[in-house]
């Protein structure tokens, strides 16, 4: 796959992830800093390593599944694997400036 196509697909994956919100926080999960890694493999398989705001997050089953479904809607994506981790644990430092502003932390 040409590098440009791979980057374009990665941008589409990021855009799809930005449509997913934690139900308790009015900021998308990408800007919250919940996405640790995005890999697009040559046959358009997508791997996302992500976390949640806490291991006891009430939306623990919903957010990863919503993320997977949002990515699967992208034309050309084959398979999507979402892996959850809590290492390193989420902290407010992981939020983008946009998220911090939206939530009143700046």
Image: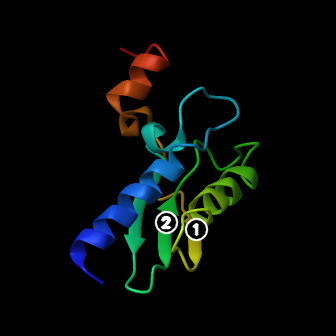
> Is residue 58 left or right of 31 when viewed as pictured?
right
**Residue 103 image offset from top left, x and y in percent:** 49, 18
For the point 49% across and 79% down, the residue is: 45
Which of pointers 1 and 2 lies earlier in the amino acid sequence? Answer: 2
**Residue 58 image offset from top left, x and y in percent:** 76, 42
Q: Nearer the viewer, residue 28 or 77?
A: 77
> Is residue 62 left or right of 14 when viewed as pictured?
right
Q: Which residue is label 2 attached to? A: 48
User: Which colour style is shown?
Assistant: rainbow
In the depicted structure, whether residue 34 falls above or below residue 13 = above
Q: Nearer the viewer, residue 87 or 106?
A: 106
In the depicted structure, whether residue 94 falls above or below residue 104 = below
Can residue 89 be seen here? no
Count of marks overlaid on the render? 2
**Residue 21 image offset from top left, x and y in percent:** 61, 38
Dot 1 surroundings within 10 Å: few (below 14), some, or many (20 or more)?
some
For the point 64% across and 38% down, the residue is: 22
Q: Which residue is label 1 attached to? A: 82
Secondary-structure class at tag 2: strand
């Amino acid at each position: 796959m040409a590098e440009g196509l791979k980057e374009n697909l990665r941008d589409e994956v990021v855009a799809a992830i930005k449509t997913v919100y934690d139900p308790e926080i009015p900021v998308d999960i990408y800007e919250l800093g919940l996405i640790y890694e995005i890999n697009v493999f040559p046959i358009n398989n997508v791997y996302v390593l992500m976390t949640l705001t806490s291991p006891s997050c009430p939306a623990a089953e919903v957010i990863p599944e919503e993320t997977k479904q949002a990515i699967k809607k992208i034309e050309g994506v084959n398979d999507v694997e979402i892996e959850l981790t809590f290492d390193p644990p989420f902290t407010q430092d992981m939020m983008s400036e946009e998220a911090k502003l939206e939530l009143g932390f700046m």
